[in-house]
Each structure stands twice: as structure tokens, then as C-alpha cells.
Amino acid sequence: MIFFRALRRIVWWGNRVWWWGRQRAGRGTNTVPKYVHPLDDKIMRQYTENRLAADFEVFCDLACIPLAFDIVTLLAAAEIHRRKVGANSFNVVFIIDATDPLPQFHRNENPVTKEKAYRILFNIGVLATHLFDKICDVTVFRSRKSLVNYWQTGRYGLGFFPTDYTPYHPVSKTVQNVTQYAPVKMLDYLKATGDSDPLLVVPENARVSVQEWLSKITDKLFIVTLTLRETPNVPERNACVSEWQKLVNEFSDQPIQFVVVRDYFAINPDKILIGENVIECREAVDDIVYRSALYEGASFNMLSNGGSALLCYMNPRIEFASFNVGLDADSARQEDMLVQWGLSNGGQLPVNGVNANKFRRLVWQRDEAPILIKTLLEALENIK
């Protein structure tokens, strides 16, 4: 009797060991075959590849960066960072919590209100990501609590930019610490490395759309865009409209078509310049991609220095003259701006092989009619 009990226990343990070995080998009789639908397999492979390609994330926190064209500078800085670290691509995360004070709210006559903030974020920030072809995903958080949760549990990628960023108590120094990526220094980096790839890339469909629009509104071969700063904030930096009107009048009998691109924060809805040789491009006001394509498609661009000028500074394909350069900003003296930009008084943007023959000029003078006229005449002589 004892013998049979011992034999049964040996057989039972033998079966358990045999079953356990089958399971470890993946050959268990009770296992479910691991069949994956081909479509599911393709989706998961693409998902994995995208995750692997997104090497770092860029945090554009509206608690510490102005809700303006400064976003373009931050994205361009991220693109330079991508090239320096050898990353394939990056993702962009925008944060705009209604309880956060937007950084420019301390200004008098602030053009940005909290009621308009979300629309402006989309038109300037989210659309600007279309100008950088190495951006994968774009996310907008409207709650800092959700952002912190994402930071702790959901982030992917190998790093983030700016590298000293924290979502808990973001401060303005986060952005100031990337001033090494100011436009001049970014262009210096491209020149030093011989990198000919532009920081901003205008999508082909936007180029085609602009060319179709220009062909409809004029048959003149020389197109000149005029972008005038007209913001209630620090009005002393605004364009002298009467002087630009003299420019338009001076060339009224020339085969030149002037295209007015209004300031994004325009304070006057009426036409700012008049004449048979002038037309406004409303499409370029809210759409930063269309604005960039128009600057690239025009023969020449004349701007009073402001946020829009960044689209010209960082695209070597664009020929331009930017006036009122060097004036004190609302939150910085001229000396501070020169240090941040890496410029000396009267200096120019770096020139490399890509833009060596382009007419790209910073004009360190007020936009007075004689200067405007002289600059355009020089452009007409030099631009082929």
C-alpha cells in the first residue's frame, strides 16, 4: 500500500515537472498561439519606429516664454540642438494653463489677452511646427497638473530641451539659458559646420499656394513685401507709416508690386498703405506658414524689425532688409539685446555659401523715406 502511494506521488511530480518544462519552452498544450493580424503588426511596427525616432522632446511653456514669434526662435534652437546631439527628430509639447500668468502680461497695452491666448497659440505656435520637418508629434496641455503627470509617467524619448526645464516651477531663465541659440549664433553654427540645410523649411503646398495667389493678383515680375510693426506694445518701435507711403509713391510708375503683410497684432483694421501698386495679403496675417511662403516667394522683403523678421533671418533663401534694428525693446536695453544676439552695433547676420550672394541686410536706422528708397534701389540692382 505504501509502495503504491509513493509511486503515485512520483508520477504526479513527474507530470508537473514535464508540464512546467513544456510551458517554459513555449510548447505547452494549453498555450494560445501568438497570432497577430498583419495590420496590427504594421501599426505596432510604425508606432515603435516613431517612438524610436523621436529622440527628445521640446517643452514650450507659455509660463516662461512670450506667446509671440519667440516660439519660432525656440523651435529653431531645438533644431540646432537636434543637429548637435545627432538626434533623428523631436516632439514639441506646448503648455498653456489658464491659471498661469502669461509672461508678457506685465506690459502696458498688452496685445495678448487670455481670451485670445489659445487662438494665438495655434496660429503662431502650433502652425510654426510645420516649418520644421524633423518634428514628429505636437501636444498641447491646458493643465499643468496633466503636464506634471505626463512628465512623471508618460514621457518618451531620450531627453528634453531646454535641458534645465522643469514643469513644476518654470521660470523665465529657462528660455534665457538658450540665448546661445539666438538667431545670429544659430547661423554662426551653421556657417562653422558648413551645414547648408536651412533651419526653417517652407512646405511645398504652401509655396504652390502663394505662387498661385501672386499670379492672380499681378503680372509684375518684381514682388516686394512690406511688413510694418504696428503693435500697441512699445509703439515707439512701430513703423513710420507715412514714410513707407512715400516709398510706395516713389515707385508708382515702376513694374513693382508691393504686398502689405499686416502685423499679427495689428491695431488698425483699415488699410495701412494705399496705391494702385499696393495690395494686402490677408492670408499671411494669421497663418505663419503662408507668411513664410510669401516671404520666400517674393522677390524682396522689407520689414520693420519685429517677430515676423525671424522668418527671414533664419531662412537663407529669403532676401530682405530689416529696418529699425537696434532700438531698445520693452524689456531690454540696446546693450542687452546686442549681447543676446551676438551682434556689435551695425553688425550683420553671418554669411555662408548658401546665402553668400543674397541681399540680406539689417538696417540700423529708422525707417525714413530716403533710407527706404535707397535700400530698395540697391536691392533692384543686386537681385537677379
Image (spheres, grey):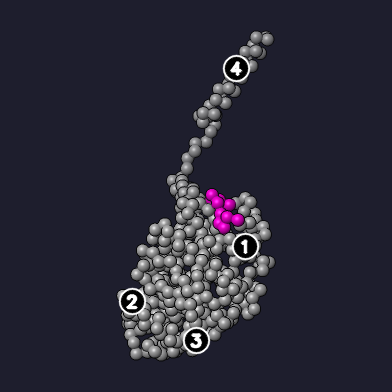
The residue at which mark 2 appears reads as 382
Measured from the top left, where is residue 188 in percent x and y? 45, 62
Q: Secondary structure at mark 3?
A: helix
Q: Residue beneath label 3, please?
A: 241
Q: For this view, does 296 lie left or right of residue 22?
A: left
Q: Earlier in the sequence, mark 2 or mark 4?
A: 4
- Dominant secondary structure (helix, strand or loop) of the stretch shown in magenta: loop
Tally of numbered discs? 4
Residue 158 is one of the magenta-drawn residues:
yes
Q: CA distance from mark 3 to mark 1?
A: 36 Å
| Residue 132 visible here | no
Q: Is residue 155 above or below residue 311?
A: above
Q: Are marks 3 and 1 in contact (CB under 8 Å)?
A: no
Name the residue: 47% across, 62% down.
186
Measuring 41% from the left and 90% from the top, which residue is drawn there?
249
Of the two numbered discs 3 and 4 on the same chain, state the one appearing first in sequence.
4
Q: Label 1 amino acid?
A: Lys
Please report the residue visible at 47 percent of the width from the left and 40 percent of the height from the top: 35
Task: Measuring from the top left, give residue 102's x and y in whole percent.
Answer: 64, 69
Quarter containing the C terminus: bottom left
Q: Which residue is mark 4?
A: 11
The mark closer to the camera, 4 or 1, is 1
